[in-house]
C-alpha cells in the first residue's frame, strides 16, 4: 500500500485551547500542569464554557469561532475549545474514539476543579454532533450530575441507540442537559435524551436547508440564543407532538438556550423559527404577525401556524 493510501489511525490526541476576553483572537494551548494553567489567562473566578466540535472538524471551525465570540460578548468566561484528533477518522473510527476523548475532557475538568478551584456550578459543556456525546462522557467522568450544564447541539444519530445509554449523552451526565434537535432522525438523534429537548420547526427540517445545513443550524440557533435569548417555545407532551406542532397553544416561559433553563425547563418543547436571521421568535404575537411566509412546514408539508 502506498504512503498516500494508508488509512488514518487512532491518534488519541486531545488538546485544549483557552480563549478569554484578554485573548479572544489568539487561543493559548493549555495542559493539565501547574505551569501551563498559571501562565495562561485562566481565571477560576469566572465561569467556564467548554466547546467540543463534531466529526471531521477541528477547534478552529467556524461554529466554535461564533460560539466563542457570542460567549465572550456576554461575560468574562474561560472558553476552552477541545481539539480531538480522531474526529478526522472515518466515522466508525471517530465513534469509537468518543468515550476515550470524553474521559480526557473529564480529566481536564477534574484537574481544573481540584487543583485550580474552577467551579463546577458555573461550568457548561457545549458539544455539537459527536461532540455532544463526548460531552456526556466527560460529565460521566467527573461524576453524574456534578457538571452544571451540558448543551447537546443536534447529538449525532448514526451508531447511537436509545437502549445503549452508556454510549451516548444522557440526562444524568450533568445537573441539567439541554438538547437542540435540528435534523432529528436524519443526522441527529430523534428522541429526547436530555432534561429538556427543543425541536425548532419540529426538529427534522429547517427553512431553506439542503442536506447537512439543518444539522449545523443547531449551532447557529444556539449562538443567536446566547446573544438575544429570543427563542420562545411551546411545551409538548412528547416529541411526537413536537414534530407535528401539536403542543400547548400558549407560549411557555422557557426560551431555548437560556442560561436560566436549568431551574425551569423540563420535557419537550416545540420552537417556532423564522426563515432568516433573526431566527428566534420571542412571543406568540410576533409569531402570528409574521404571517405565512415566515411560518414553516413540518416534515409532512403541514403549515406550522398556531
Image (cartoon, rainbow, N blue to C red):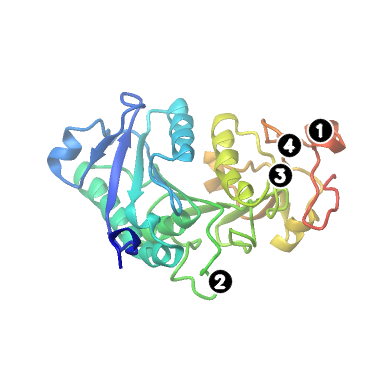
Give the structural element (helix, strand or loop) at label 1: helix
How crowded is the residue under tag 2: few (<14 C-alpha within 10 Å), some, or many (20+)? some
Q: Which of pointers 1 and 3 indicates the residue nearer the eye?
A: 1
Q: Which residue is drawn at 52% across and 47% down?
A: 262
Q: Which percent across, then down, holds residue 121?
A: 38, 45
Q: Residue 162 carries which label?
A: 2
Residue topped by disc 3: 252
Asked if disc 4 and disc 1 are in contact, CB closer than 8 Å, the reply is no
On screen, residue 296 versus residue 123, left or right, reads right
Give above or below for 207 relative to 141.
Answer: above
Mark 1–mark 3 distance (CA, rounded to whole Å)? 13 Å
Q: Which percent across, then down, holds residue 84?
A: 34, 52
Name the foreground residue: 93 vs 215.
93
Residue topped by disc 4: 274
The reply to whether residue 238 is in sight is no
Give the structural element (helix, strand or loop) at label 2: loop
Mark 4–mark 3 distance (CA, rounded to whole Å)? 18 Å
On screen, residue 139 versus residue 33, left or right, reads right
Q: Which residue lies furthest to the bottom in this view?
A: 163
Earlier in the chain: of badge 4 and badge 3, it is 3
Earlier in the chain: of badge 3 and badge 2, it is 2
Earlier in the chain: of badge 4 and badge 2, it is 2
The reply to whether residue 178 is in sight is yes
Residue topped by disc 1: 285
Q: Residue at x 35, y 62 (%)?
A: 5
Q: Which residue is drawn at 72% across and 40% down?
A: 273
Q: Which quadrant of the figure contains the C terminus?
A: top right
Amino acid at each position: 500500500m502506498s504512503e498516500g493510501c494508508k488509512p488514518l489511525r487512532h491518534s488519541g490526541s486531545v488538546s485544549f485551547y483557552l480563549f478569554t476576553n484578554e485573548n479572544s483572537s489568539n487561543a493559548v494551548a493549555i495542559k493539565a500542569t501547574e505551569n501551563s494553567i498559571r501562565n495562561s489567562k485562566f481565571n477560576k473566578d469566572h465561569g467556564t464554557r467548554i466547546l467540543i466540535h463534531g466529526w471531521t472538524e477541528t477547534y478552529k471551525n467556524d461554529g466554535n469561532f461564533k460560539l466563542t465570540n457570542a460567549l465572550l460578548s456576554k461575560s468574562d468566561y474561560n472558553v476552552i475549545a477541545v481539539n480531538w484528533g480522531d474526529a478526522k477518522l472515518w466515522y466508525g473510527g471517530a465513534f469509537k474514539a468518543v468515550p476515550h476523548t470524553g474521559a480526557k475532557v473529564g480529566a481536564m475538568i477534574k484537574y481544573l476543579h481540584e487543583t485550580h478551584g474552577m467551579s463546577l456550578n458555573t461550568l457548561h459543556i457545549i458539544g455539537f454532533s459527536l461532540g455532544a456525546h463526548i460531552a456526556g462522557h466527560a460529565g460521566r467522568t467527573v461524576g453524574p450530575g456534578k457538571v452544571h450544564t451540558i448543551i447537546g447541539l443536534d447529538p449525532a444519530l448514526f451508531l447511537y441507540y436509545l437502549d445503549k445509554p452508556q454510549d451516548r449523552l444522557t440526562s444524568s451526565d450533568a445537573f441539567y442537559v439541554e438538547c437542540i434537535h435540528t435534523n432529528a432522525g436524519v443526522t441527529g438523534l430523534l428522541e429526547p435524551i436530555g432534561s429538556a429537548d427543543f425541536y425548532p420547526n419540529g426538529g427534522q427540517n429547517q427553512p431553506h436547508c439542503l442536506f447537512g445545513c439543518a444539522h449545523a443550524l443547531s449551532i447557529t440557533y444556539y449562538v443567536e440564543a446566547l446573544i438575544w435569548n429570543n427563542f420562545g417555545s411551546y411545551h409538548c407532551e412528547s416529541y411526537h407532538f413536537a414534530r407535528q406542532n401539536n403542543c400547548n397553544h400558549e407560549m411557555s416561559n422557557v426560551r431555548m438556550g437560556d442560561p436560566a433553563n436549568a431551574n425551569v425547563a423540563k420535557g419537550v418543547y416545540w420552537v417556532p423559527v423564522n426563515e432568516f436571521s433573526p431566527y428566534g421568535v420571542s412571543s406568540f404575537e410576533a409569531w402570528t404577525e409574521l404571517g405565512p411566509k415566515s411560518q414553516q412546514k413540518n416534515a409532512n408539508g403541514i403549515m406550522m401556524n398556531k
